[in-house]
Image (spheres, rainbow, N blue to C red):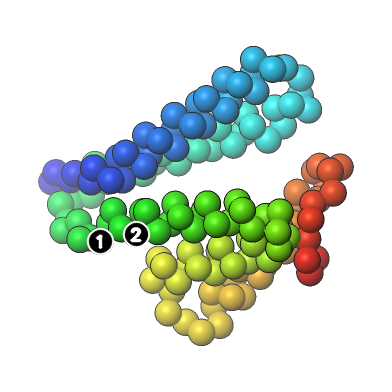
Amino acid sequence: MSARLSASHAAFLGIVLAITGFILWSALSASTSLNNLIVVAPAALLLGVLALCIVVTVLRSPDADPAPAGALGDLLLLAGFGIFCYALTHVGFDVATFVFVWAGIVMSGGRSLWVPPLYAAIFSLALVKGFGSLFPYPMLTLVL
């Protein structure tokens, strides 16, 4: 029972962890006050645990044929995230999140007509309301 982490997925995990580590280091260097670290430290910890879970799951699973378009899917998802970041200030946090989550579900294989938009709407609502209650900074939103 041996498995292999594809090079594109390993590189993606490495980039995510390196950027997360840099952001955490930068936040700790700026200030160790609770207000500065209320999102950064838990997010960094969560990303580290998720990356560890991904690696352990892949190494414990039986060998499977890697998807031939794995690298292309990763690049499309990264491009979508770049578009999402750009759209945050142009169409609003709520609409950008809704479209990004919907597209991500469809890219991951969601074929239902009503489940992806419903999930994206519930996720966007929870995220916008949750962040709105955490941060006093007003976020640009179009609908919510």
Q: Where is residue 73 shown, x and y percent of the image?
A: 34, 59
The quadrant of the picture occupied by the C terminus is bottom right
Q: How many marks?
A: 2
* Residue 84 seen in render: yes
Q: Where is residue 103 shown, x and y percent of the image?
A: 50, 68
Number of other residues with Cα within 10 Å of mark 2, as a class: few under 14, some 14 to 19, many 20 or more: some
Most foreground residue, 99 or 134: 99
Number of other residues with Cα within 10 Å of mark 1, as a class: few under 14, some 14 to 19, many 20 or more: few
Q: Is residue 144 left or right of residue 12?
A: right
What residue sits 78% from the left and 61% below the top?
Answer: 141
For residue 85, above or below residue 125: above
Q: Is residue 138 left or right of residue 111?
A: right
Residue 69, disc:
1
Q: Is residue 130 left or right of residue 115?
A: right
* Amino acid carrying mark 2 in the image: Gly
What residue sits 18% from the left and 45% below the top?
Answer: 3
Q: Where is residue 60 shown, x and y percent of the image?
A: 24, 44
* Amino acid carrying mark 1 in the image: Ala
Residue 4, disc:
none
What is the C-alpha distance between the residues marked 2 and 1? 6 Å
Q: Quadrant of residue 136?
A: top right
What residue sits 57% from the left and 20% below the top?
Answer: 25
For residue 73, above or below residue 111: above
For residue 58, above or below residue 64: above
Most foreground residue, 17 or 93: 93
Which residue corresponds to mark 2?
73
Q: Where is residue 54 shown, x and y percent of the image?
A: 36, 44
What residue sits 52% from the left and 25% below the top?
Answer: 22
* Residue 60 seen in render: no
Q: Is residue 138 left or right of residue 87?
A: right
Helix or strand or loop: what does disc 1 sit on?
loop
Residues at badges 2 and 1 in contact (C-beta under 8 Å)?
Answer: yes
